[in-house]
Amino acid sequence: AQSVTQLGSHVSVSEGALVLLRCNYSSSVPPYLFWYVQYPNQGLQLLLKYTTGATLVKGINGFEAEFKKSETSFHLTKPSAHMSDAAEYFCAVSLLFQGAQKLVFGQGTRLTINP
Amino acid sequence: DTGVSQNPRHKITKRGQNVTFRCDPISEHNRLYWYRQTLGQGPEFLTYFQNEAQLEKSRLLSDRFSAERPKGSFSTLEIQRTEQGDSAMYLCASSPAEGYGYTFGSGTRLTVV
């Protein structure tokens, strides 16, 4: 069964510092992996996704993630944090069923940016 | 493309009352999903429609919950005899037949008092 573990429920960085949000997955088949961002009282917005091909995936707002099969990881990074990056971030793995996708989410990491 | 629209955005109801939420997916998307998100948790899958057919329901979807998608367009999620444990954000998402990743709506936040 697919599952996702996000290490660290809260991460705090200074503005301009590196952002690193950790995600490890468990999957019995080659995974499709996603990162979503959620701002307060909003739905989820897709940041980036890995399906096949290049293991380094670039997304919106300067974020990127690297799929490492040997480490079963899909960590999210951004070289320089901005105040507007403060939000909740969710990693998810896709489970295919009935011709569609069911997303299994991690518990989320709340990112705080210090001025 | 106006995105996925959910109404209402917020709903406060008394325990025991029935509530109904509506989701309007992106018009060309034939797949529609409902998720529930409780405070401090990631979203959890509730149910999935392909066109008008409901193809899967989670164990989380008790007998008090029912979802429909008449004519394969908008969808409704009804909760009967609400309980305090039903308080959560209910998220709707849609996706096309091809490709990966959903488009989520802004959600309906339900508070049962």
Image (cartoon, rainbow, N blue to C red):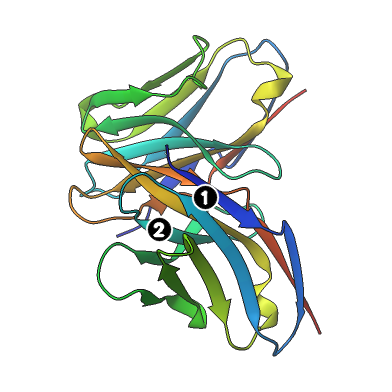
Which residue is pictured at 35% across the width and 57% down the height?
Answer: B2
Q: CA distance from mark 1 to mark 2?
A: 22 Å
A48 or A21, which is in the foreground? A21
Q: Element type at marker 2? A: strand
In this rendering, position of residue B86 left or right of residue B49:
right
Query: Looking at this rendering, what residue extends furthest in the right direction?
Result: A115
Q: Which residue is mark 1?
A: B106
Which residue is pictured at 65% across the width and 24% down the height?
Answer: B86
Q: Amino acid at mark 2?
A: Leu
Q: Element type at marker 1? A: loop
Residue A101 location, quadrant: top left
Residue A53 location, quadrant: bottom left
In this rendering, position of residue A12 left or right of residue A102:
right
B1 or A41, which is in the foreground? A41
Q: Can see residue B4?
A: no
Q: Position of residue A13 (x, y in %)?
A: 75, 78
Marks 1 & 2, CB-CB < 8 Å contact? no
In this rendering, position of residue B106 left or right of residue B47:
right
- The chain carrying label 1 is B
Mark 2 closeness class: few <14, some 14–19, many ≥20 residues within 10 Å: many
Which residue is pictured at 58% across the width and 51% down the height?
Answer: A5
Q: Amino acid at mark 1?
A: Ser
Q: Which residue is mark 2?
A: A33
